[in-house]
Image (tube, rainbow, N blue to C red):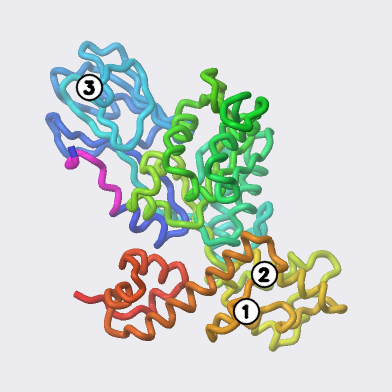
Amino acid sequence: MAADQPNPAPTHAISVEAASLSLQRCSLVEVDGPQPGTVFELTRARSVVGKSPECDIFIPDPTVSRQHAEILEEGGRYLVKDLGSTNGTELDGARVKEAYLRPGARIQVGSVVLRFQAGYDPVRIAPSARERLGALSGKSLRMREIFALLERVAPSDSTILLLGETGTGKGAAVQTIHELSRRRGPLTVVDCGAVARNLIESELFGHVKGAFTGAAGLRKGALENAQGGTLFIDELDDLPLDLQPKLLRAIEERVFSRLGSTQTIRFDARVVAASKKDLWREVDAGRFRQDLYYRLSVVTIRLPPLRERPEDIPLLYDHFSGEGGPRFDALPEPVRARWLGYAWPGNVRELRNAVERGRALQGDGLVEVSATGLASPAASGAGLVPDYALPFKEAKERLLAAFEREYLKRLLARHPDGISAAAREAGIDRKHLYSLLEKHDLAKARPADEE
């Protein structure tokens, strides 16, 4: 029933937007029994359920055995196991000896019903003293907090969800996670946004000869190629909805089948996923499965855009300049001011390209603002012209971001009386408009909400 479904919205409101880092917290809630509404936090690798006072989850009910069942945590997955109880253990109405749990699952021990649910806690962690970690660079507080968390979670097998705008360094983050992990296998990357939708299933799971038109032979997919290493699923928000259950099963059950085959293959890889969108909003909109979201977001890290950490610009400039290249401190003061004051819609990737372009165009390596495109034409709304020197996808994303920002600024200027009128003129949902304003750091400039 709807009343029994988990309601994680309050925890999500603080886990991604307000905090850069969050860890998944799982618990059991007594739905039907002697103590309805009681929450049992799952803080141990093994929690025993029973009517014995010595049990971790104490349920004083005559239909519950003294040690009825146990909940085991295994690398971010939770397993319920019956301990030879008199009345048995059921999961979602089916009697089980052992089974993996998904958020919202109902566990019945005797006549007592428990609901398994997940939430998120913001992480407060002492920042690292490092200014570089693996492929990542930054001396800002936000980045050093991320460094400290990565040092802690990278050696584990917990799944990690990286959130952030295009160009914020999600690829560098997963490279760092892989280097710091205990896994010696390969880092295998699947970019869901760069693969045709009808080929993503084959890209992930592989296929056998004849699986579809054009399948001339056997092909291994990313899950198989990542064995013993790390599987990085980039642009996760572009993963088709109908494929999400198959990916969830592979991650939970640790087996999968190639497209067109019934033979199962063992899956042994650490999973890291990344998205430029807020996936919880995608869940709310029905475009992403809630159970897959919970499975992938055991640890959630939001990589901040460059405009939120301008103190990192000199360090990044020097890093991309390389050995023997010009130093940021050696640039003329007006040039340094423009670099520090620019919004960097393309984030770290745009900064790297600007450094490389500057070195190519200036014999002494000093970057002139006019030569690198740092004077943003989007500020006036004129000259929204793509940079044809960039890869197609990046050039398209930068042009779209510049258009969106300028459109929103003009829309808000025409509607000082309320956000509803602005949404009506734009022909978009009000929630979507809020999302766009936050994306482009214009939320503070929006008109007052109407009652």
Q: In this view, does 425 lie to the left or right of 143?
A: left
Residue 288 magenta: no
In x, y percent, where is residue 268?
58, 28
Q: Image quadrant of residue 16?
A: bottom left
Q: Which of 165 and 50 is in front in this view?
A: 165
**What residue is at 57 percent from the left and 36 percent from the top?**
204
Q: Image quadrant of residue 422?
A: bottom left
120 over 404 or under it: above or below: above
Q: Image quadrant of residue 241?
A: top left
- The range drawn in magenta is 2-9
How many residues crowd mark 3 within 10 Å: few (<14), some (14–19), many (20+)?
many
Judging by the rendered image, the residue that carries numbered circle 1 is 340
Dot 3 falls on a residue whose secondary structure is: strand
Judging by the rendered image, the residue that carries numbered circle 2 is 351
In x, y percent, where is residue 104?
29, 36
Q: Is residue 323 left or right of residue 276?
A: right
In x, y percent, where is residue 325?
83, 70
Going by the numbered disc 3, the residue's amino acid type is Val
**What residue is at 55 percent from the left and 28 percent from the top?**
259
Judging by the rendered image, the residue that carries numbered circle 3 is 109
83 over 311 or under it: above or below: above
